[in-house]
């Protein structure tokens, strides 16, 4: 038995936790703006319910964003960002998310919105790190374009980018192995692979790679290998400021550079060999023809 | 089954006929009570009587009707909730306390793990400090978690309290008499609101959902475990057969109460299906409303958040 007048009531009801987009600048604590008592009949009270302005359009269940209120995804983002500071203590778990929700003024039950193994938290963190890296590389590129900085050679650029990205893991390094194992769960592999490949792509883009041939694949495969192995080395590195890891990184990048020059050497050697063989074949055939003629 | 239902309806329609004759005397819209049609007030009264009579045999009947599977359903509900220590739970229509006891078990083991982890994190403490922290935390074995069991029926609460005493649950439990359509609690109080196999018996479901919204804190979670509709046709026929032929018989044999269990299976059929209940929950203001079917739709867990 559903009363007919409830649907319009929902549209006017102020959300308890989803903030108006304008509030984000003021950074108010989360309090429910106009919680109504449902005993009061809605009809006569409509003009009074929203003193702040035009009627607040709530977010539809399809996640459509309204002009005024943030969507559920944005709220989830805020909770996950707040949860990151509790990760060193609680690990990448639902408890860290619960603590994060508490700091935003929400109930700890809000952690139920996410999976209980903390996958979303880890994926959120990785995506945030990738965004930070992109911004950093973009800023540096602008400096180079403005002529205020020197353009780095490729190997140094790669080293710098990978180191900058791996340094973002340092505050969470103790719980990072747990995160890596969660990222390898079959359920998470599509998303984590996606994030990894787009990060590698970004780095190569800012390194100035414009290849359109098979090199595109080899370069990304090589850099993915370098990144993953360096990350694993970092997990068990106990040297001060991870010096061993950066040295390992330097060696791997040097190897990759040498390999690519070896490859081009092999290619040119190959071409030379082929040309030599062709010349030999022509010489032999000429000799045969001349012998036949004689 | 069809013949059986017609006979049933013939038996039950007589009192309904009498009610319709008195329509001008009894106010209120017509509602369903199983397959009967009654007014709101009548329905509330009848349901109260049903549970008053089944209260003592409630748990035994649950086990025999569902062959013990209801325990698994309730465990799944608790896992879905995944409460951390410090959660405040309101269990409405929680009569005999099944959900409440499971909550306490879950939270105390979560608390133990939390304490162990805290210890590992602070491994540089001396043995003296560790011993002192044991003393301090011993009195906080639930981590400040609390569950309030609310039920409209005094008999069910009585049975629940006796069970708690018998099983040894003392702290973290409160028993409150209250109506789901009008809860005696203030706004924004609870972290989680559960209603397990109870919302079917609420006369005005929309009011109950609104009350749920009111008493939950922002970010709080609404969980509803309830019998629902089976979409698979073969299974649905088997289920109907079992429900209408076996369950009332069990009710008569074990609890000596045919009519109550007839009401039970009929009320399951009258309850809105999964999608409709989801829409009703969304209407009450909850976000991220979703449901999970257990056993092909025999039971469904609906979940929503007050955002």
Image: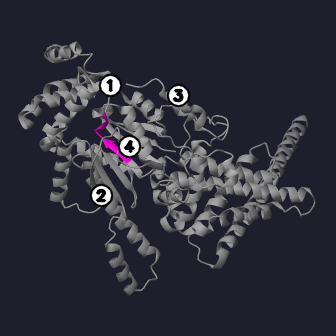
Name the residue tied to disc 2. B104
- The residue lying at 52 percent from left, 45 percent from top is B307
Question: Do marks 2 and 1 share a chain?
Answer: yes
Q: Are marks 1 and 3 in contact (CB under 8 Å)?
A: no
Which chain hosts label 2?
B
Q: Which one is earlier in the sequence, the residue at label 4 or at label 2?
A: 2
Please tell me how crowded label 2 is: few (under 14), some (14-19), or many (20+) other residues with Cα within 10 Å: many
How many numbered discs? 4
- Residue tagged 1: B232
The 10 Å Cα crowd at callout 3, few under 14, some 14 to 19, many 20 or more, is few
Q: Is residue A226 left or right of residue A121?
A: right
Residue B115 horizontal/vertical position (percent): 38, 70
Q: How is the image coloured?
A: one colour
SS at circle 2: helix
Q: Is residue B37 above or below residue B116?
A: above
Residue at the spot x=85%, y=40% of the render?
A285
Spatial distance from mark 4 to mark 3, Cα to Cα? 30 Å
Q: Do dots 1 and 3 share one subunit?
A: no
B95 displayed left or right of A74: left
Q: From the viewer's side, name the closer residue of A239 and B84.
A: B84
Mark closer to the observer (1, 4): 4
Considering the numbered disc 4 on the image, is that residue within a helix, a strand or a loop? strand
Within-10-Å neighbours for mark 1: few <14, some 14–19, many 20+ = few
Q: In the displayed structure, does residue A222 sit left or right of residue B155?
A: right
Q: Which mark is residue B223?
A: 4
Q: Which residues are magenta?
A: B193-199
Q: Is residue B171 visible?
A: yes
Residue underneath mark 3? A43
Q: Earlier in the sequence, mark 2 or mark 1?
A: 2
Residues behind callouts 4 and 2 on a single chain = yes
């Amino acid at each position: 038995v559903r009363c007919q007048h409830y649907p319009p009531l929902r549209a006017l009801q102020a959300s308890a936790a989803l903030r108006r987009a304008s509030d984000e600048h003021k950074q108010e604590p989360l309090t429910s703006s106009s919680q109504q008592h449902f005993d009061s009949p809605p009809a006569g009270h409509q003009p009074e319910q929203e003193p702040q302005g035009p009627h607040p359009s709530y977010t539809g269940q399809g996640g459509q964003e309204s002009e005024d209120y943030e969507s559920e995804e944005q709220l989830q983002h805020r909770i996950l960002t707040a949860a990151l500071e509790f990760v060193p203590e609680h690990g990448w778990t639902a408890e860290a998310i619960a603590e994060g929700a508490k700091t935003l003024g929400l109930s700890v039950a809000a952690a139920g919105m996410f999976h209980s193994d903390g996958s979303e938290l880890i994926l959120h963190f990785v995506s945030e790190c990738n965004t930070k890296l992109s911004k950093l590389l973009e800023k540096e590129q602008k400096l180079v374009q403005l002529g205020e900085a020197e353009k780095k050679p490729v190997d140094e650029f790669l080293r710098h980018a990978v180191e900058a990205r791996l340094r973002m893991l340092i505050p969470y390094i103790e719980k990072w192995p747990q995160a890596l194992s969660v990222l390898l769960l079959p359920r998470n592999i599509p998303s984590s692979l996606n994030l990894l490949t787009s990060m590698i792509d970004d780095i190569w883009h800012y390194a100035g790679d414009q290849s359109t041939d098979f090199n595109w694949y080899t370069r990304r495969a090589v850099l993915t290998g370098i990144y993953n192995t360096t990350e694993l080395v970092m997990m068990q590195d106990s040297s001060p400021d991870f010096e061993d890891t950066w040295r390992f990184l330097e060696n791997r990048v040097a190897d990759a550079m040498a390999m690519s020059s070896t490859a081009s050497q092999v290619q040119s050697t190959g071409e030379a060999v082929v040309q030599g063989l062709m010349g030999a074949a022509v010489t032999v055939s000429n000799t045969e023809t001349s012998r036949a003629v004689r | 089954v069809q013949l059986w239902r017609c006979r049933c309806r013939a038996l039950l329609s007589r009192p309904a006929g009498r009610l319709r004759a008195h329509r001008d005397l009894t106010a209120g819209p017509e509602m369903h009570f199983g397959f009967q049609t009654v007014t709101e007030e009548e329905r509330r009264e009848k349901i109260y009587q049903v549970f008053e009579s089944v209260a003592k045999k409630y748990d035994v009947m649950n086990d025999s009707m569902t062959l013990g599977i209801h325990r698994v359903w309730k465990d799944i509900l608790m896992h879905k909730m995944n409460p951390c220590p410090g959660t405040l739970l309101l269990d409405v229509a929680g009569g005999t306390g099944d959900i409440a006891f499971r909550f306490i078990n879950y939270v105390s083991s979560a608390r133990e793990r939390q304490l162990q982890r805290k210890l590992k994190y602070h491994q540089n403490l001396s043995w003296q400090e560790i011993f002192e922290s044991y003393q301090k935390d011993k009195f906080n074995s639930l981590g400040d978690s609390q569950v309030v069991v609310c039920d409209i029926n005094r008999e069910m609460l009585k049975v629940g309290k006796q069970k708690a005493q018998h099983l040894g649950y003392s702290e973290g439990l409160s028993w409150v008499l209250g109506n789901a359509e009008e809860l005696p609690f203030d706004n924004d109080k609870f972290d989680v609101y559960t209603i397990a196999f109870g919302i079917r018996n609420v006369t005005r479901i929309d009011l109950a959902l609104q009350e749920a919204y009111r008493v939950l804190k922002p970010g709080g979670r609404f969980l509803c475990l309830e019998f629902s509709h089976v979409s698979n046709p073969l299974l649905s026929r088997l289920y109907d057969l079992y429900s209408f032929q076996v369950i009332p018989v069990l009710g008569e044999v074990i609890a000596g109460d045919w009519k109550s269990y007839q009401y039970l299976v009929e009320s399951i059929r009258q309850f809105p299906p999964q999608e409709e209940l989801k829409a009703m929950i969304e209407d009450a203001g909850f976000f991220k409303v979703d449901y999970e079917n257990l056993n092909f739709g025999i039971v469904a867990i609906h979940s929503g958040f007050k955002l």
